Structure formats: C-alpha cells, structure tokens
C-alpha cells in the first residue's frame, strides 16, 4: 500500500489511506485478538488506535506470573535512573506466542546513546550567526510564506525531558524580523510552553515557527527516562514507539513530523526497529512525511562499541532512525564560498552522520536507491567496505545547513551546530510545499523519499551536490578514523 501511494508512476500515487483503511490493513485476526485478550483477562489493558498493539499496565507480580520471569530493579550507576527488567529471559506463553511479534519494555535496557542532535558552538565569537534570512536565501524560500492549512499539521518531536518556552520563540521571531506571532502548541510538554526551556526543543521549535509561520504546529513531548514512582509499561520505558503510535492516531494526520534524535543502530533490538518502521510505514501511507536528523558523530557513533570491546573505527556505526528506509534522512552542511558537509576538522562542533544500515538491505527495501548508491559503493576500496554493510540502506537522503544557528534559551542566545538544525529546516520546506499543493487541490507529499530519487534520476541538474567533506571523525570529544564517507558528485 505504501509503495502504491508513494511511487509517482503508480496510478494510485497520492491516494493516501484513510484511518479506517490503515486499520483494516494492520488489524490482527479475530483469533489473535481473542487469544491476547484472554491472556490479559482481568488486567488493565487497552488496544492502540489501529488495533495492532495492546498496552497493559501490570503489577510486577502479575507480569512475573504472565511472562514466567523474575523481575528486578536495575539502577544506572551514573544517572541513578531505574528500570524494571527480568533477570535473564522471559517467556510468552504458547497460547499467544504465534500472535505476538514484540513485547516492548522488557528485552533491552534504555541506551545512553539515545541523544539529541544539537551541540553548542565553541567558535561563536569568530563566525556570524546563520539567520532565517540566510537559510531562505540559500534555499530559495520566499520570506513571508505561511504554511497554515487545516490538513498541513506539523509535529516536532521532543524527548529526553526537552521542552521550550513561548517567550523564547517570540524573541527568535522578532530578532529575525519574522512578522508572524504563531507559536507551536505544546502537547505533554513540561511547563506547557511557559517553564524553563532546553536547547534542542527550543532550536527545533524556533526554526519551524520562523520558516513556516504555521498556526497548526505542535511540539509533542515524550520522556525516555522511566519514572520509578510508576509501574513499568510501554509508555514508561523507551517512548519512541509510543511517540509514533500517537502520531498515527492523530486526525487528520499531520503532513510532516520533524525528529532530531538518534541512537546507534546496534543498541536497538531488530524486533523493536521493525515495530517502529511499521509505524513509519503507516504514517507514509496516511500522507505524513517523517523527517529525521542523520546524527552528529560521523561514522564513529557513540562510545557504545568500546563498551563491548570493539574499537570505534573497526566498524562504522549507523544511526537509527536515520537508517530507516521509511524516513527522509537529513545531514548537515555549513555555508561558505561553497556549501560543504559539516565536520569537526573544518570548523564544526559536530560531524554530520552518514552511512549504511546494518539491518535494512537496500535491494529488498530501498530499490529506488539501487543504481545511484551502487555506483558510489563500487568506488570504495575492499578495505573500507568491510567496515560497514555495503548492501544496506544508505543515508542521508538530503542535507541542509546545520552550523551556527543562534537560538534563544531562557532569554539568552546559544549558537548551535547539529543535524538537529537541518531536520526542522527540511521539515519546514516540506510543509511549505504541502501548503502550495493543498491550496491547489492536491495532497501532501507523504512518503516523499522515493519521489526525490526518481526526480534526481529524471532531472539531476535541479539538485545541488555537496562535494566537500569526509565524516571520518566523531564529535569534538571523539577521535577520527583513517577514512569515512567522502562527499562527492553523483
């Protein structure tokens, strides 16, 4: 269904599915529903909007009985965060085993790698701030455009206790001579837009507000640190699946979602990746574009590899969800005489992420990348291709500036680098294009990634190649490998 509505050569292109149509596609069989409801009879549970997930709130003793496991409290030695997990394995009873794909919140510990993609700039006294006008001029965005439309909702994801302050957004609009007073609305956010702000949510919110001037934008806040005073549950552990389920329950569906967070792909169980990817596919089928930052640590990733005895340069580290084939993945650049990839050796506070998924095979899932990426991989040495999955989904798909953005945080200005700058810029461009299409009786772009590759194949001259840069380094607190992925023409 997703391929049919996203392929511009398909007669069904743009015929996005209704909520009922999505539910009909993913709804479990009556046998499966009956088995799971019988298994959970007498306990507090509910089904997701499309009926394919069950969310249960269980006492620890009940969870131990149902899953034949012994639960323990595990406390992190640095953060003091506490989670409840089984010691060793747990068992899904035979009566429901055939109907259960994933049990969320039990089979892995929250990774310290899950992180925002914005970083303070250390060279702010030496370089000018990149303004909204600079962004608009570079990418041909007319000033004064308003993306407001009832079917053009914009959602900004905020995790890790990130939140924003309305007064900061208004100050950013004023400083950049944006006449709009539209500010994204908070949803589940601490302080409800009036409390102490944090850098990541402030950055994303201010850029989207300035570039879209939209009155139908929302900041959706979900925390990833478990609240030890509450029972363990799917929403009280890792929140990303819950985030996407909430996105896919929204009516009408948002036209674009901006996500500026990443984790090392290997830190996330494959079953959990598949579950999230299924939510991405639902979103695309409903007409929602998912825009994701590509990571800020080059090929190095976090320090996770070192903790399991692997040198950080022995394996290139892809980032998720940037490596998902069902998102539009965005890398970072810096302006200059020639726009180039943002890297630490060339003055950045971060090195833009790029790489290949270790989970997702390009030929099977991302056939629109095949010719373009195959040629690029063929030019690499055997020694380099041994360090990553050369058959994997390649990312990022597009780039935008991610250097020296001046963002207001609690009344002061912080200059920031990161792919978290780039993602909301691209999301804003998608929203503006969607507004143009909707005003003319069209539909939102939806899962736009295949369209962009098909457009490049048909008319490559309308794209601007980034030909300078190598993401062999990590962040400013990390080292560099002997080589990484080099920017170049395609």
Image: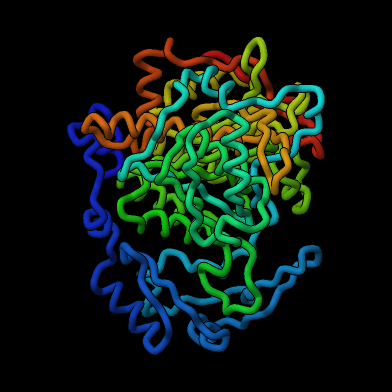
| Position of residue 206 measured from the top left corner of the image (x, y, whole percent) | 57, 40
In the displayed orientation, state which residue is furthest to the left. 11
| Position of residue 100 measured from the top left corner of the image (x, y, whole percent) | 40, 69
Residue drawn at 67 percent across, 50 percent down: 198
Front residue of 176/10: it is 176
Note whether 49 is above or below 71 in the view shown: above
Note whether 58 is above or below 457 in the view shown: below
Q: How is the image coloured?
A: rainbow
Front residue of 235/272: it is 235
Note whether 28 is above or below 303 in the view shown: below
Q: Is residue 416 left or right of residue 398?
A: right
| Position of residue 92 measured from the top left corner of the image (x, y, whole percent) | 46, 76
Residue drawn at 46 percent across, 53 percent down: 276
Residue 62 in sight from this viewpoint: yes
Count of numbered badges drawn on the protein: 0
| Position of residue 119 measured from the top left corner of the image (x, y, whole percent) | 72, 39
Q: Quadrant of residue 12?
A: top left
Q: Quadrant of the N terminus?
A: top left
Q: Quadrant of residue 297?
A: top right
Q: Is residue 141 left or right of residue 299?
A: left
Residue drawn at 40 percent across, 52 percent down: 278
Q: Is residue 352 left or right of residue 39?
A: right
Residue 377 in sight from this viewpoint: no
Note whether 478 is above or below 307 in the view shown: above
Q: Quadrant of residue 339?
A: top right
Front residue of 89/13: it is 13
Residue drawn at 37 percent across, 29 percent down: 433
């Amino acid at each position: 269904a997703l391929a049919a509505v996203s392929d511009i050569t398909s007669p069904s292109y743009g015929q996005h599915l209704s909520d009922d149509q999505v539910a009909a596609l993913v709804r479990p069989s009556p046998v499966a529903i009956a088995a799971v409801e019988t298994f959970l009879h007498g306990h507090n549970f509910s089904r997701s909007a499309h009926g394919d997930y069950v969310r249960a709130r269980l006492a620890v003793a009940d969870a131990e009985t149902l899953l034949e496991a012994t639960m323990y409290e595990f406390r992190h030695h640095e953060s003091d965060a506490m989670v409840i997990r089984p010691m060793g394995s747990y068992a899904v009873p035979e009566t429901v085993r055939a109907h259960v794909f994933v049990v969320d919140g039990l089979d892995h510990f929250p990774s310290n790698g899950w992180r925002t993609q914005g970083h303070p700039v250390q060279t702010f006294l030496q370089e000018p701030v990149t303004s909204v006008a600079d962004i608009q001029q570079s990418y041909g965005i007319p000033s004064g455009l308003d993306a407001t439309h009832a079917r053009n909702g914009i959602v900004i994801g905020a995790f890790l206790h990130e939140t924003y302050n309305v007064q900061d957004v208004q100050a950013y609009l004023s400083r950049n001579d944006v006449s709009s007073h539209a500010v994204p609305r908070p949803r589940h956010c601490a302080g409800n837009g009036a409390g102490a702000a944090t850098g990541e949510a402030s950055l994303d919110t201010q850029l989207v507000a300035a570039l879209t001037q939209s009155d139908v934008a929302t900041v959706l806040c979900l925390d990833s640190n478990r609240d030890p005073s509450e029972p363990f549950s799917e929403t009280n552990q890792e929140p990303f699946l819950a985030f996407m389920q909430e996105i896919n329950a929204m009516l009408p569906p948002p036209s674009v979602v901006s996500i500026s967070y990443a984790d090392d792909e290997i830190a996330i169980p494959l079953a959990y990746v598949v579950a999230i990817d299924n939510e991405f596919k639902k979103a695309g089928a409903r007409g929602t574009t998912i825009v994701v930052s590509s990571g800020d640590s080059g090929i190095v990733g976090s320090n996770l590899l070192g903790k399991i005895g692997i040198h950080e340069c022995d394996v290139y580290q892809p980032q998720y969800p940037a490596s998902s084939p069902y998102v539009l993945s965005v890398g970072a650049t810096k302006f200059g005489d020639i726009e180039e990839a943002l890297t630490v050796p060339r003055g950045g506070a971060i090195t833009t992420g790029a790489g290949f998924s270790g989970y997702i095979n390009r030929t099977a899932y991302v056939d629109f990348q095949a010719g373009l990426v195959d040629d690029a991989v063929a030019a690499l040495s055997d020694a380099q291709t041994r360090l990553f999955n050369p058959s994997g989904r390649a990312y990022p798909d597009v780039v935008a500036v991610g250097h020296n953005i001046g963002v207001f945080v609690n009344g002061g200005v912080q200059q920031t680098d990161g792919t978290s700058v780039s993602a909301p810029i691209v999301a804003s461009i998608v929203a503006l294009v969607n507004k143009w299409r909707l005003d003319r009786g069209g539909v939102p772009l939806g899962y736009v990634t295949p369209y962009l590759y098909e457009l490049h194949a048909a008319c490559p001259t309308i794209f601007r190649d980034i030909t300078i840069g190598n993401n062999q380094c990590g962040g400013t607190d990390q080292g560099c490998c002997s080589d990484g992925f080099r920017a170049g023409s395609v």
